[in-house]
Each structure stands twice: as C-alpha cells, then as structure tokens.
Amino acid sequence: MNTQQIDLVRSSYALVEPIAPQAAEIFYTQLFAADPSLRPLFRGDMAHQGERLMGMIGSALTLLDRPAALGSVLRLLGSRHKGYGVQEKHYATVGGALIKTLEQGLGDAFTSEVRSAWVELYGVISRTMLEGAREPVLA
C-alpha cells in the first residue's frame, strides 16, 4: 500500500471508530446475509466479537507502516482462523461485508478513492492470512 492509501484508510477508520459497536453489528448483519452458513463459526457474545473485530482492524492500521510486523500478526491470525473452520472461500464474503459496512457507515465520505484503499488493504490482509492458514502447524 502506498502512503496515500494508508492515510485514506486511517482517516476513514477514524470516522468509523466512534460508532464501532454499530459498525460491527452492520458488518455481521451483512456477513450472515451474504452467507448464513458462517453464523455457526461465531460462538458467544456477538457484541464482544464485534469489539474484537474492530480492535483487530485498528491494530492492523497501526502496523501499516511496519509491513513485516503486520505480516507476522496476520499469518498467525490466519492460522488461528483455519482452526475455527474458516475456509479460503470465506475471505471474499468477509471482504464484501467489510466494504458494504464501510459504505453504509461512512456515507458520502466513502469516496471511490477510499473504497479503493480499503479494497487494497483487505487484499493484503486476506492474502497474508491465507498464507498463514496454508503454513504447516509446528507441533
């Protein structure tokens, strides 16, 4: 990602952060509408799950200037998600739900440039998590 894209995702996320619980609820509504078979992968309190999701996104954004550190975190996350039953095909569904959530949450602030930056970011996230999911587990 280039500097402009990083700035765009960070500044747009700053607009979403104050409504994080609502954004997370929108995200999961979008996700389960797109693929209801994903619902059983999420156990427990969805509000807590939403907090974790928004925290993970925020953490990823702080590491955008340190791609090696971000890559390590994302590969580990991908490996863990594989253990939860997440499959490669689910990543596209998650990406679509994320973009729809941002579009709804940001309204007019979700410009084509912001959209492109988030699509690029999610591409990096999903590719790196999938690398982690494909790595052999060391015992």
Image (spheres, rainbow, N blue to C red):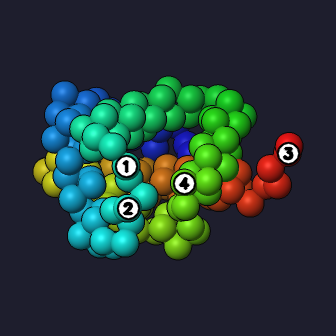
Residue under pointer 2 = 40
Q: Secondary structure at mark 4?
A: helix
Pointer 2 local density, CA inside 10 Å: few below 14, some 14–19, many at least 20: few
Mark before the other along the chain sequence, 1 or 3: 1
Marks 2 and 4 in Cβ contact (< 8 Å) = no
Residue under pointer 1 = 43
Residue 23 image position (x, y, % from top left): 21, 44
State whether residue 67 appears in this view.
Answer: no
Of 84 and 126, the residue lying toward us: 84
Looking at the rendered structure, the kind of residue marked 2 is Pro
Marks 3 and 4 in Cβ contact (< 8 Å) = no
Residue under pointer 3 = 138
Residue 6 image position (x, y, % from top left): 47, 38
Marks 1 and 4 in Cβ contact (< 8 Å) = no
Residue under pointer 4 = 84
Q: Residue at x 24, y 38 (%)?
A: 47
Looking at the rendered structure, the kind of residue marked 3 is Leu
Marks 1 and 2 in Cβ contact (< 8 Å) = yes
Q: Secondary structure at mark 2?
A: helix
Q: Residue at x 85, y 45 (%)?
A: 138
Q: Nearer the viewer, mark 3 or mark 2?
A: 2
Mark before the other along the chain sequence, 1 or 4: 1
Q: From the viewer's perspective, is 12 left or right of 41?
A: left
Q: Quadrant of residue 123?
A: bottom right
Q: Secondary structure at mark 3?
A: loop
Q: Secondary structure at mark 1?
A: loop
Marks 1 and 3 in Cβ contact (< 8 Å) = no
Residue 61 image position (x, y, % from top left): 47, 33
Q: Residue at x 61, y 54 (%)?
A: 83
